[in-house]
Image (cartoon, helix red, strand yellow):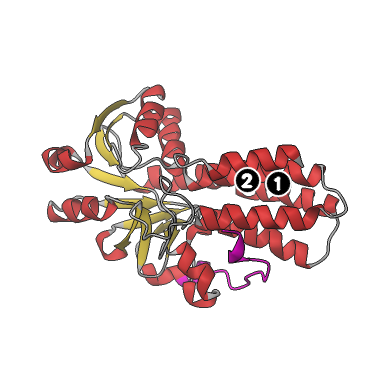
Amino acid sequence: MASFKQKCDAILRDHSSGSTEILYKTIDALQAGLNDMSETGMKYILQHLNRLFFKHTGFAVLYHFINAFFLQVEKGVSKETLLKFTTDYLNQWKGAATQINSHFTKQIKVRSTCILVHSNSFSIHQLVQGFKQKGIAARFIQTMSEPGGEGKLQASKIKNSGFGVELIQDTDLGNFINEADMAILGADVVTKNDFINKTGTHDICKMMNSISKPVYVICDSRKIIDPDKMPVYVAQHLLNRYNNRPDQPDQYDQRNSWFETTSLQLVSAIVTESGLIKQFDQLKNFHTTSVSHLFNREFK
């Protein structure tokens, strides 16, 4: 179990990776744990998965996987079946980014476009790769994305993909907003009314709306939730009600200023693997209703 614990501890310290990257690291750690599992190992694995979930506030894609895994455990299936489940899960969702890219490029004109991006999103990384493969010319304005400054990581990935990118301070957004033809944002959580993303997202959406420029949110459907159908403590965690700041000791409970909620009224469309969603009442079709009883907030 040493490898499993080491991998989990590294994930707990990771405050720069996006939610999908955290998910992949979690699955990798879990597979290591299952391969080394002793007779009493499952309880240990469940404890650490709860720690990961309750440490990384608002990561719906992480919730989607851990909940699905917990439901398998509740069935009492074998270790081999659980390992197969993790592989099948990866295979099931590995094509989602390609489908999102296809819908985006077919229905939204992006050639020779200046695109404003924010934070550090796996979905945006994949979209940029899709632009590269299709030979789409575009340039990017990337915010620094404070607190945390993870926009630098995303700017580097965009640059390494061969696109022009200008990294700006969040406070300079007003000086650059008129250059942008559109904003493309990721999301950690989407509900029927709002979406949650890195702090600064709301200001971007308001500014883009004020100059009649579109805002697109790209994410796969795992990030769409219905908090009314979840235990309160799970829903509050996903909705970023309270969280320990990464730069504060665990014993201090503080409001989370790293993420914020933005109304979908400021969004032109959400692009998922199923296509463009402009009528947001359609989001109710994506909600998952079964929630495992194995979530335990004592391990946060």
Q: In this view, does 85 lie above or below 286?
A: above
Q: Is mark 1 on a helix, strand or loop?
A: helix
Q: In terms of depth relative to the viewer, which is nearer, 115 or 196?
A: 196
Asked if the residues shown at circle 1 and circle 2 are in contact, with their CB atoms under 8 angstroms apart, the answer is: yes
* Vertical comparison of 123 with 292: above or below: above
Which region is colored magenta? 284-300
* Residue, far bottom: 228
Inter-mark Cα distance, 1 to 2: 6 Å
Position in image of residue 239 (x %, y %): 43, 64
Dot 2 falls on a residue whose secondary structure is helix
Name the quadrant containing residue 65: bottom right
Give the farthest residue toward the right: 39
- Name the residue type under label 2: Thr
* Residue 30 spot, x, y in % from top left: 70, 46
Question: In terms of depth relative to the viewer, which is nearer, 130 or 16?
Answer: 16
Residue 263 in view here: yes
- Residue 1 locus on image (x, y percent): 77, 42
